[in-house]
Image (spheres, rainbow, N blue to C red):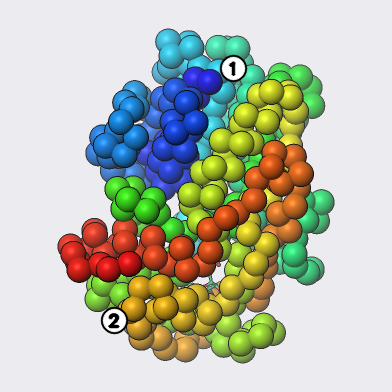
Amino acid sequence: MRVLLTGGTGYIGSHTAAALAARGHHIVLLDNFSNSERDVPARLQALTGQSFPLIEADIRDTETLTRALRDHEIDAVIHFAALKAVGESEADPLLYYEMNILGTIRLLQAMQAANVAHIVFSSSATVYGQPDSSPILEDFPTRVENIYGRTKLVMEDLIRDLARTNKLSGAANLRYFNPVGAHPSALIGETPRGVPNNLMPYLTQVATGERPHLNIFGNDYNTPDGTGVRDYIHVMDLAEAHALALEHIFANNVSITVNLGTGEGTSVLQLVRAFARATGREIKTLIAPRRPGDVASYYANPALAEKLFGWKAKLSVLDMCRDSWRWQAKRAGINDVQV
Ligand code: NAD
Ligand code: UDP
């Protein structure tokens, strides 16, 4: 297949590009580099031995998008490009409506103009808000807790509507739980700008000495050890899921909404301990107040992905810690990584 990846030089997009290339697909990357590095296509080439044509463009530019879809004879799109910071979305809702919702409408218009009728979309477990219980199934109620989550839900609805009215032949809304890790080569990974919000990038920056300690946001939750529980998923497993979901919707012309998680909950303290085991690095931690808006615990029921397209996460929390560390250590210039 010839697949265009919006946001293809970002964290999850770049890993998916490598996974798709390994399965013999031809990949075109489209990105405006608002949150990624310009040498990602070159690093992908070093990793896979294949070249990755790049279009530097904004997803709101329907004309450029339409031309790119036609010129490269694209069969399907995977849509990663979005803004993704919850706090920023609450500070500037219109920016998020424009980039995420309007951007997606523009992309869908370009796809319609170029007769591209299959899309895989990066959604998020954030659409479940504060779930009543875990494991979470796809038919649990969706809830909007912040502007970022609102945009994900609206984008899912747009895509489902177009599939229902036969404007799209196949669509997959993939609800990611907590992606972490990096390619084991340490050639691609996550590059958060500024102080990381998420646990794993913060933790690895404590390990490199870039930050003095990890604040654990609350140890009085109703969880086994009092700290927040999440379903961490290795980005390599996530990348593989995109390839299988895409092949499934392309072959069967179906519209699906699917959780992507491991089905296992891991607490903050468990992750800190796993990191020490996997890397030999102890992490200094301090107990801090709860972070506003945080949920005590959530994790996926990932059975539907296995039933529909035979996908199941394979990599463990130790693998996630090891590969996150390899990547962050390399970036920090630490060369004695023996993991
Ligand atoms: P990322 O920021 O690394 O990747 C997004 C890419 O899109 C970046 O390369 C950025 O430069 C590009 N981009 C942003 N706006 C653009 C625009 N208007 N036009 C063109 N390119 C644009 O983020 P990621 O972690 O790889 O996330 C990918 C997708 O997955 C996003 O839609 C995100 O909301 C979703 N998601 C991420 C997580 C996570 O924890 N990382 C969890 C759930 C869902
Ligand atoms: N967390 C923490 N310290 C940090 C960052 C996160 O204790 O510096 C906790 C957070 O409260 C949550 C878990 O780690 O319980 C995962 O947080 P993250 O932001 O990575 O994911 P999300 O909360 O968006 O699922």
| Left or right position of 314 against 11 | right
Q: In this view, does 143 lie above or below 205?
A: above
What residue is disc 2 on? 212
Looking at numbered disc 2 in the image, what kind of residue is underneath it? Pro
- CA gap, disc 2 and disc 1: 49 Å
| Left or right position of 276 against 232 | left
N-terminal-most mark, 2 or 1: 1
**Residue 295 locus on image (x, y percent):** 64, 72
Q: Dividing the image into 4 quarters, which one contains the C terminus?
A: bottom left
Q: Is mark 1 within 8 Å of ligand 1?
A: no
Residue at horizontal 49%, vertical 20%?
A: 2
Q: How crowded is mark 1: few (under 14 residues within 10 Å), some or many (20 or more)?
A: many
Are the residues tagged 2 and 1 within 8 Å (C-beta)?
no
Q: What element carries label 1?
A: loop
Residue 297 appears in view: yes
**Residue 36 locus on image (x, y percent):** 33, 44
What residue is disc 1 on? 116
Tag of residue 239: none
Total labels drawn: 2
Q: How crowded is mark 2: few (under 14 residues within 10 Å), some or many (20 or more)?
A: few
Residue 290 appears in view: no
Quadrant housing residue 31: top left
Residue at horizontal 59%, vertical 43%?
A: 241
- The residue furthest front is 338
**Residue 148 locus on image (x, y percent):** 57, 52
Q: Is residue 140 above or below residue 211?
A: above
Residue at horizontal 75%, vertical 64%?
A: 135
Q: Does the residue labelled 2 lie within 8 Å of ligand 2?
A: no
Of 32 and 313, the residue lying toward us: 313
**Residue 35 locus on image (x, y percent):** 36, 46
